[in-house]
Image (spheres, rainbow, N blue to C red):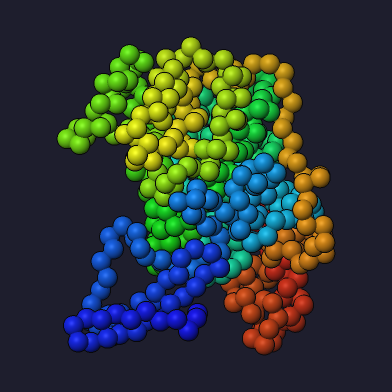
């Protein structure tokens, strides 16, 4: 907070409100006392001028086309980091050391499986059910299986829930796809990196060996990285709103998935594909360009223009080279949908009408041209990814450490217990540790509120063993 104040004059009355300054971005006026002082509310339906919270996670400057994760430009992270490394950065605020990255990657990898009984949920859905409908239901159902990480007031349980969500979401998404095409579910493979594992679960079949194309794996990892966070967008705000009632993390994320479904948010991907299918051929593009310019026509040009980015989408800049590489690899240059997409982008970016409105192509427009039917099951894509002898893309752990001086700093909570938790797992201590897990953080850390029936050190040890159960037996 600074000494600056904002003065509001209403008639003959004057009111002062403090002005808050962030490390980046515009200053904000603290109006929490507005109603108490004036009896009035503000009116800002789209939150276009409202800061709902303070955050050190992501910063966006739409006019400059700037996107920062924890202060790091997205283009640098995309070029030098893996998605798992970016997850660590977003969760803990700093890039990991080599050792921390190895431990975190192992932690996520060992929790990619889902509980076997969750397979039965899928059988209750129609085969043609929308994948987001399935995702919403299954993610919400996770709360019925992972009872030891549903208390959002416990920082350790929040961390465990976060790791489970990162690890299991690709598995659930792949299962959703497999169910839609009538193929058996494919289990995760611990020897693969995050993106390669997802592709394996989507495209491999039990009848033959499968090796992931490293070019496609790297592109998928980039897609994950570019969409890891995007400030206070609609789905993030939905998760925060649901969480404000102290709902469990899985229910909150399910609410976010439902919000992401909408065509004005994540569903814009599907809307762009539908638009390309509606256009059908290159010859019909002028007709739809004219419709997009007609204010009385409900048709919208999907995939161009962004509410936040006014000059360019930095994610699109990162993806352009990779998109071309993947499309060349897939050999789908004669695909009618791809041809429509490429010609539409060319015309729209050269048309003064769209230039004046800063309707530049977004990140979401780059990777959706390969499928004529708009589905992941396109045979051209499937065969191109499966064909050939390719080695998997290894995560660049060695040589990718930019913080060697902090090798010895204290690791995050879940990781500092990791090595010790593997040493011993006697049942009595394990049960005691689980009981300790429901105590406050001050108690199990041995602060003044520690239970008198057990020493602080013993309580911490038991807590470690409780996490051993989480690490070893979690599905």
Task: Indicate the position of residue 39 as horizontal and vertical percent values.
Answer: 22, 81
Task: Indicate the position of residue 412 as horizontal and vertical percent values.
Answer: 70, 63
Q: Pick out the residue farthest to the top.
A: 334
- Residue placed most toward the observer, 426 or 186: 186
The reply to whether residue 221 is in sight is yes
Residue name at image x 35 percent, y 22 percent? 277
Residue name at image x 53 percent, y 34 percent? 174
Residue name at image x 49 percent, y 73 percent? 21
Task: Indicate the position of residue 6 as horizontal and vertical percent values.
Answer: 37, 79
Q: Position of 272 compared to 380: left or right?
A: left
Q: Position of 236 compared to 108: left or right?
A: left
Where residue 429 sits, quadrant-wise, is bottom right
- Residue placed most toward the observer, 299 or 195: 299
- Residue placed most toward the observer, 220 or 230: 230
In the depicted structure, whether residue 473 falls above or below residue 276? below
Residue name at image x 59 percent, y 19 percent? 328
Task: Indicate the position of residue 267 as horizontal and vertical percent values.
Answer: 38, 39
In the depicted structure, whether residue 216 falls above or below residue 458? above
């Amino acid at each position: 907070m600074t000494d600056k104040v904002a003065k509001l004059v209403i008639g003959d009355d004057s009111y002062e409100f403090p002005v808050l300054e962030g490390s980046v971005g515009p200053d904000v006026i603290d109006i929490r006392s507005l109603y108490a002082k004036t009896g009035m509310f503000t009116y800002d339906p789209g939150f276009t001028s409202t800061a709902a919270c303070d955050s050190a996670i992501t910063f966006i400057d739409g006019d400059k086309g700037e996107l920062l994760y924890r202060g790091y430009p997205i283009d640098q992270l995309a070029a030098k980091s893996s998605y798992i490394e970016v997850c660590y950065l977003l969760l803990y605020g700093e890039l990991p050391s080599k050792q921390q990255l190895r431990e975190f990657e192992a932690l996520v990898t060992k929790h990619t499986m889902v509980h076997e009984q969750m397979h039965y949920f899928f059988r209750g859905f129609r085969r043609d059910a929308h994948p987001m409908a399935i995702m919403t239901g299954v993610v919400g159902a996770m709360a019925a299986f992972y009872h030891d990480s549903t208390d959002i007031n416990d920082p350790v349980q929040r961390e465990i829930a976060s790791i489970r969500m990162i690890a299991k979401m690709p598995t659930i998404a792949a299962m959703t796809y497999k169910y839609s095409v009538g193929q058996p579910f494919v289990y995760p493979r611990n020897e693969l990196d995050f993106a390669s594992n997802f592709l394996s679960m989507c495209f491999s079949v039990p009848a033959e060996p499968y090796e992931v194309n490293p070019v496609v794996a790297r592109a998928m990892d980039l897609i994950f990285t570019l969409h890891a966070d995007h400030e206070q967008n609609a789905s993030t705000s939905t998760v925060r709103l649901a969480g404000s009632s102290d709902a469990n993390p899985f229910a909150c994320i399910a609410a976010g998935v439902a919000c992401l479904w909408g065509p004005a948010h994540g569903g814009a991907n599907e809307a762009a594909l539908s638009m390309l299918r509606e256009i059908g051929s290159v010859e019909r593009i002028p007709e739809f360009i004219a419709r997009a310019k007609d204010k009385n026509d409900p048709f919208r040009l999907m995939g161009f223009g962004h509410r936040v980015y006014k000059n360019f989408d930095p994610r699109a800049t990162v993806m352009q080279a990779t998109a071309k590489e993947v499309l060349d690899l897939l050999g789908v240059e004669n695909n009618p949908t791809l041809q429509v997409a490429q010609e539409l982008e060319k015309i729209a970016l050269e048309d003064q009408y769209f230039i004046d409105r800063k309707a530049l192509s977004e990140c979401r427009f780059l990777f959706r041209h390969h499928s004529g039917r708009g589905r992941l099951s396109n045979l051209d894509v499937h065969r191109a990814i499966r064909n050939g002898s390719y080695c998997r893309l290894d995560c660049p752990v060695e040589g990718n450490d930019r913080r060697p001086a902090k090798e010895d700093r204290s690791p995050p909570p879940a990781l500092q217990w990791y090595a010790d938790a593997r040493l011993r797992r006697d049942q009595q201590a394990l049960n005691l540790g689980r009981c300790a897990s429901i105590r406050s953080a001050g108690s199990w850390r041995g602060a003044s509120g520690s239970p008198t029936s057990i020493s602080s050190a013993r309580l911490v040890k038991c807590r470690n063993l409780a996490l051993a159960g989480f690490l070893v037996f979690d599905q």
